[in-house]
Image (tube, grey):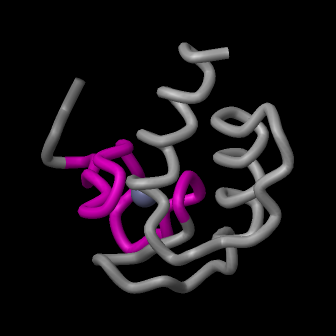
Amino acid sequence: MKPQNVGLCTTCQAPLMPHTACKNCGTYKGKQVIDTTRDMKREVKKAASADDHDHDHGHDHAEEATESKEEKAS
Ligand SMILES: [Zn+2]
């Protein structure tokens, strides 16, 4: 491992080549350069939501917490 040759994504901390957009989250130096938000949201939904929560309220963390509780409750 040579950290000098590999940068870290400032958003998701994934290793990435310098001067290259992060393929993991689609950002470059903290700026969104690749539209991966839809895919990421889809992944989050798929992972976190068993029931259909198609309406996003804008606070994903709160929803995740709520859904975790719901899963435990049911
Ligand atoms: Zn990233």
Quadrant where the C terminus sits is top right
Q: Which of these two is toward me, 12 or 68?
A: 68
Position of 70 with respect to 19 (left or right) is: right
The spot of residue 61 in percent (x, y) is 40, 53
In this figure, what is the number of numbered marks?
A: 0
Position of 36 with respect to 51 (left or right) is: left
Q: Which of these two is toward me, 38 or 59?
A: 59
The spot of residue 66 in percent (x, y) is 48, 42
- Residue at 57% x, 37% y is 67
20 in magenta: yes
Quadrant where the N terminus sits is top left
Q: Residue furthest front?
A: 73
The spot of residue 19 in percent (x, y) is 38, 74
- Residue at 29% x, 47% y is 13
- Magenta-colored segment: predominant secondary structure: loop
Q: Which residues are magenta?
A: 5-25
Against 1, residue 62 (above or below) is: below
Against 61, residue 73 (above or below) is: above
Position of 13 with respect to 60 (left or right) is: left
Ligand 1 quadrant assignment: bottom left
The spot of residue 46 in percent (x, y) is 78, 39
Q: Which of these two is toward me, 56 or 7?
A: 56
54 in magenta: no
Q: Which of these two is toward me, 48 or 16?
A: 48
**Residue 56 placement: quadrant:** bottom right
Against 52, residue 35 (above or below) is: below
